Amino acid sequence: MDLVFASLLYPTGKKSIYETKPFSSTLNSTRKLSTQKTFPCLATVATTQTTQAFELENKKHDLLRAIQDTQRGLVTTTDQRFSIEEALVSVEGYDAGAPIDLVKLDGTWRLQYTSAPDVLILLESSVRLPFFQVGQIFQKFECRDRSDGGVVRNVVRWSIPALLEEQDGATLLVSANFNVVSVRNIYLQFEEISIQNIYISEELQALIAPAILPRSFFSLQILQFIRAFKAQIPVRNPGRRSVGGLYYLSYLDENMLLGRAVGGGGVFVFTRAQSL
């Protein structure tokens, strides 16, 4: 019975309809060739990206080395300025044409170099005037949850020797709103200038409220008033457009920001800093 049933399913001289054919050697060779082509392409792309990233980091290092001994741009020769501009352009070429990433831009950036006349005057005053010191200068962008702009604050730490703590005795804050007006340009509208975070020196504190004597309520009130003092000067006039300017963000990544003030206002080199 088994033989009869088998003969009905598989008639003599005919191939079974369930017979499995071996894989075609042509198909196998095609798949192997396709795989061989894919993996080298992916490897080439990865190698190219790694090479470009390595080259970019070298360019950024060259730029930071070029500005290293310039006192943030205050002391430069003609040759140095040429080398710095050349290094700037080299880094800018890696990010040309990419839209501004406001998530990356958000945060605090420390000024490393500038050729902007208004900032250089401030730095020069610190050198020429013995009673005036300029500490660190920052730009703080607040735009993480925005797609069209945000707020930028220029933060200048300064001091008056013997009266305030060195370098960080007080803070000059220039606040502005900004709007993204093109792929790489933002327009700044300055709103307010303020002086705050005043920290007087230990010598001055001793004069106001001597430590060896019981401090009176009045002297403690003076110290508290100085620490909480904040002077605000609005820049924007009601009914009139505020003072502003066009700012070109020429390069941006996780740890470096390059900018150019449109109209000959100078260049800026910033590196990422801790949040203020």
Image (cartoon, grey):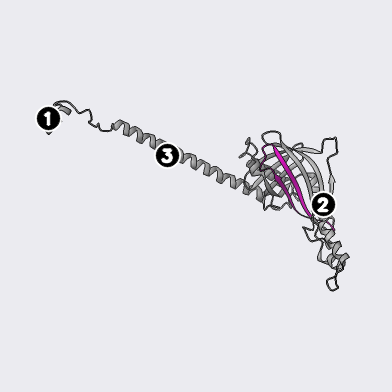
Question: Distance of mark 2 from mark 1, alpha carbons?
Answer: 106 Å
Q: Earlier in the sequence, mark 1 or mark 3?
A: 1
Q: Earlier in the sequence, mark 2 or mark 1?
A: 1
Q: As shown in the figure, which amino acid type bears the numbered disc 3?
A: Phe
Question: Distance of mark 1 from mark 3, alpha carbons?
Answer: 54 Å
Q: Which of the 4 image quarters holds residue 250?
A: top right
The magenta-colored residue range is 131-157
**273 inside magenta stretch:** no
Residue 107, given in percent of the width and then of the height, sits at 68, 47
Between residue 11 and residue 85, name the one nearer to us: 11
Q: Residue pushed farthest right?
A: 218
Q: Residue pushed farthest bottom?
A: 212
Between residue 230 and residue 193, name the one nearer to us: 230
Q: Earlier in the sequence, mark 2 or mark 3?
A: 3
Question: Distance of mark 2 from mark 3, alpha carbons?
Answer: 60 Å
Identify the residue under disc 3. Answer: 39
Query: Is any atom of residue 106 visible in this view?
Result: yes
Between residue 225 and residue 126, name the one nearer to us: 225
Identify the residue under disc 1. Answer: 4
Q: Residues within 10 Å of mark 2 (few under 14, many from 20)?
A: some
Q: Which of the 4 image quarters holds residue 118?
A: top right
Q: As shown in the figure, which amino acid type bears the numbered disc 1?
A: Val
Residue at the spot 49% in from the left edge and 39% down from the top edge = 45
